[in-house]
Image: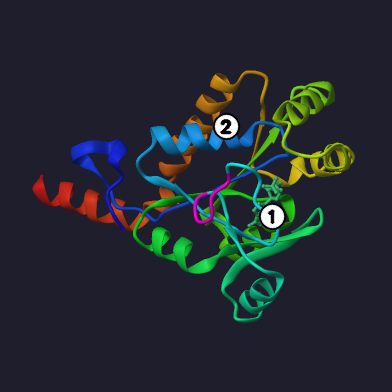
């Protein structure tokens, strides 16, 4: 465990937490994730593996690890993925080693995964997991954002629109729900969730015992 930078000189060691952001494609979760990663030094992104083709501008090792189906099935079999799911027509999964190392060192990890992966992580990680569902302000706005990307074909856009309402039905499974009307406001809401969750007593129990004992010993 490492000190929580938010607490400065009086830092208290704690376990890292897993912050999941889920939403239908186009609801704005990528923008929120990027802003959070930029402004906060103690959280890093879990980079997933996927069998889908890279979109223009996407980089191997930065956006995803782009792998073959054979490699994906090998990783699943070897237990190298913390969770894995088929989303649309492709397979996705979270490499285990990176996440476990970060958490053990007291660093937080951000996940951009769907509801299936979130359910799996919740079952295995319990209270280490904090889940946030990002809703678009309306279906019309969601469609506008998906078309605005202009990277996916018409078929893909239509397919994702039809999946959006199904995906959105999973919001009750999440700890928090953010309606992304205004991206700046959504970023500060997710940041507030992160700040509060870091202060939870149960994440800092060991550090607090040492801290309070030391104070009492001084008196
Ligand atoms: P895209 O192909 O547009 O990058 O992502 C499609 C969907 O797959 C998104 O909802 C994204 O959250 C989800 N996804 C990305 N990586 C993972 C992963 O490792 N596991 C799971 N379960 N879903 C993922």
Numbered circle sitting on residue 165: none
- The quarter of the picture where residue 166 lies is top right
Q: Position of residue 90 (x, y in %)?
A: 76, 59
Q: Residue 142 or 171: which is nearer the viewer? A: 142
Q: Position of residue 35 (x, y in %)?
A: 48, 31
Q: Quadrant of the C terminus?
A: top left
Location of residue 209 with respect to 98 vertically, above or below: above
Q: Quadrant of the N terminus?
A: bottom left
Q: Position of residue 188 (x, y in %)?
A: 50, 25
3D distance between C-alphas at marks 1 and 2:
21 Å
Check disc 1 and report its element: helix, strand or loop.
Answer: loop
Location of residue 214 with respect to 22 vertically, above or below: below
Q: Which residues are magenta?
A: 58-62
Does the magenta stretch mainly form a helix, a strand or a loop?
Answer: loop
Q: Which residue is mark 2?
A: 31
Which residue is rendered at x = 29% and y = 52% of the image? 13
Q: Residue 88 or 17: which is nearer the viewer? A: 88
Which residue is rendered at x = 63% and y = 58% of the image? 122
Query: What coloring was used for the rendering?
Result: rainbow
In the rendered image, the residue lying farthest to the left is: 218
Q: Residue 208 or 136: which is nearer the viewer? A: 136
Check disc 2 and report its element: helix, strand or loop.
Answer: helix
Q: Which residue is mark 1?
A: 53
Which residue is rendered at x = 44% and y = 45% of the image? 200
Sort mark 1 into few (<14), some (14-19) or many (20+) by Cα contacts within 10 Å: few
Q: Residue 46 or 123: which is nearer the viewer? A: 46
Q: Are marks 1 and 2 in contact (CB under 8 Å)?
A: no
Respond yes or no on whether mark 1 lies under 8 Å from ligand 1: no
């Amino acid at each position: 465990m490492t000190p929580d930078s938010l607490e400065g000189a009086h830092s208290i060691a704690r376990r890292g937490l897993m912050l999941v952001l889920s939403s239908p494609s186009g609801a704005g979760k990528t923008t929120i994730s990027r802003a959070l990663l930029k402004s906060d030094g103690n959280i890093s992104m879990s980079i997933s593996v996927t069998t889908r083709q890279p979109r223009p501008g996407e980089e191997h090792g930065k956006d995803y690890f782009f792998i073959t189906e054979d490699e994906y099935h090998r990783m699943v079999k070897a237990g190298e993925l913390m969770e894995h799911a088929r989303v649309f027509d492709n397979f996705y999964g979270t490499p285990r080693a990176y996440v476990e190392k970060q958490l053990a060192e007291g660093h937080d990890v951000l996940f951009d995964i769907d509801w299936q992966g979130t359910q799996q992580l919740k079952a295995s990680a319990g209270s280490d997991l904090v889940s946030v569902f990002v809703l678009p302000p309306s279906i019309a706005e969601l469609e506008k954002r998906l078309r605005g990307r202009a990277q996916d074909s018409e078929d893909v856009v239509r397919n994702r629109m039809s999946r959006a309402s199904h995906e959105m039905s999973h919001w009750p499974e999440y700890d928090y729900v953010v309606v992304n009307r205004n991206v700046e406001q959504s970023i500060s809401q997710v940041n507030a969730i992160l700040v509060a969750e870091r202060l939870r007593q149960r994440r800092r129990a060991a550090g607090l015992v040492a801290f309070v004992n030391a104070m009492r010993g001084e008196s």
